[in-house]
Amino acid sequence: MKKAIVVYDTIYGNTEKVAKALASGMSEKGVQADSISVQKVDINRLKEYDLLAIGGPTHAFGISKPMKGFLEKLKKVEEVKGKKAFAFDTRMKIRIAGSAAKKIEKKLTKLRMNIVRSSSSAFVLGSEGPLEEGTEERFRQIAGEIANLI
Ligand SMILES: Cc1cc2nc3c(=O)[nH]c(=O)nc-3n(C[C@H](O)[C@H](O)[C@H](O)COP(=O)(O)O)c2cc1C
């Protein structure tokens, strides 16, 4: 059975919901998928997974501090090279919002990970949420697409 892990950062729980939707969408397609926060993930166990989905809230037009810290640690994990990856974020639907996902994807590319699908954003209606209606369903569908690429 193929294995995937969704690593997320969150303050208000919105990105966690998106991470859980991704994991459940992959599980529905027969992938063993876990979701875990950046604070709890054990980077030494990432080598067990076929795909890493990595996402967080957009803070100051970019990547949140805890997620930056995690991505920095990932540099030391030789085994992530060549591993499949997907980046996502949550952000506001405003003209100049920035996107953490695009920046995360760039860093994963630098780590020589294999981006299987271009990054996606989930939108929150306010800084603390809620997620735009239908977001979790949309990410379950994206997860289904990703599951076929593992
Ligand atoms: C310190 C801070 C900075 C933020 N900066 C941005 C930003 O630059 N662009 C944006 O679209 N949203 C910004 N937001 C809103 C977050 O994207 C929003 O809180 C997040 O998507 C909610 O996800 P969470 O519930 O997982 O924390 C910011 C929020 C915080 C707390």
Image (cartoon, rainbow, N blue to C red):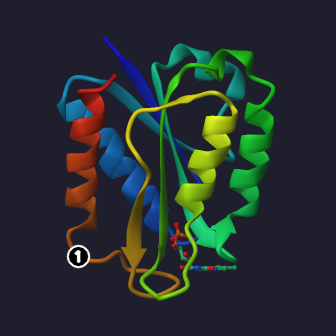
Q: Residue at x 64, y 20 (%)?
A: 81
Residue 4's spot in the image, x, y percent? Answer: 42, 27
Q: Percent x, y for residue 34?
A: 43, 33
Q: Amino acid at mark 1?
A: Glu
SS at mark 1 in the image: loop
Taking depth in this image into account, of 8 and 96 the one nearest to the observer is: 96
The answer to whether any part of residue 63 appears in the image is: yes
**Image spot of residue 139 (x, y percent):** 28, 54
Furthest residue to the top?
1
State which quadrant residue 79 falls in.
Answer: top right
Q: Quadrant of the C terminus?
A: top left
Is residue 42 rendered to the left or right of residue 10?
Answer: right
The residue closer to the viewer here, 21 or 143, is: 143
Identify the residue shown where x is 53% and y is 72%.
12
Q: Give how far across and how far down residue 23 sits, in percent.
A: 35, 40
Residue 94 higher or lower than 102, as above or below = below
Q: Nearer the viewer, residue 81 or 46?
A: 81
Specify the quadrant of the image occupied by residue 58: bottom right
Total numbered labels placed on residues in the image: 1
Label 1, on which residue?
133
Vertical relation: 123 (above or below) 57: below
Which residue shows up at 47% across the image and 67% down it? 90
Residue 10 seen from this side: no
Tell me: 148 left or right of 80.
left
Q: Is residue 72 left or right of residue 110?
A: right
* Residue at image coords 67%, 44%: 107
Please, is residue 125 above or below residue 102 in the view? below
